[in-house]
Image (cartoon, rainbow, N blue to C red):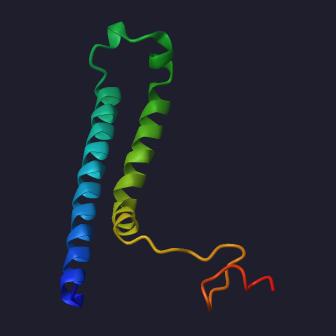
Amino acid sequence: MSKKRKQRKVSENNQQIIRITKKRLVILITSLLVALAFFIFKPGSDFWPMWMIAFRRVFIAVVGFVTLFLILMSPIIVVTESDPRPLSGPGKNPQTGSGSDYFE
């Protein structure tokens, strides 16, 4: 297989991973925004349990923080998912990439 064909295939796989990750992030952020709007505008609050009414501001704060965090971190999440890089851990020699000659 030629290098160009292999590069194109890897690039197509990365593009597919990027599209899937973006779709999942959009769905997750949208559902969190719907939950946030639910707690802010209180539809059907007559039927809510008392603990949910008591902790409504806590729910708003937590859901709002998670939503804002995901919105700000989404570019990093997409890059990390599409191009995972192996990190050198304990017992691995960064120059050779093997773990056995580090301890010898």
Q: Nearer the viewer, residue 48 or 8?
A: 8
- Give the residue displayed 44% in from the left and 10% down from the top: 49
Q: Kindly indicate the quadrant of the structure image that contains residue 40.
A: top left
> Residue 39: percent from the left, percent from the top?
35, 27
Q: Nearer the viewer, residue 88 or 73?
A: 88
Quarter of the rendering occupied by the N terminus? bottom left
- Give the residue displayed 21% in from the left and 75% down from the top: 9
In the rendered image, the residue lying farthest to the top is 47
Label total for image: 0
> Residue 67: percent from the left, percent from the top?
37, 47
In the rendered image, the residue lying farthest to the right is 104
Q: Nearer the viewer, residue 84 or 38?
A: 84
The reply, left or right, for residue 101 in relation to residue 84 is right
Tell me: residue 70, above or below residue 98: above
In the rendered image, the residue lying farthest to the bottom is 95
Tell me: residue 62, above or below residue 12: above
Tell me: residue 68, above or below residue 60: below
- Give the residue displayed 51% in from the left and 74% down from the top: 86
Q: Kindly indicate the quadrant of the structure image that contains residue 5.
A: bottom left
The reply, left or right, for residue 86 in relation to residue 31 is right
Quarter of the rendering occupied by the C terminus? bottom right
> Residue 54: percent from the left, percent from the top?
50, 19
> Residue 14: percent from the left, percent from the top?
27, 69
The reply, left or right, for residue 65 in relation to residue 24 is right
Tell me: residue 55, above or below residue 49: below
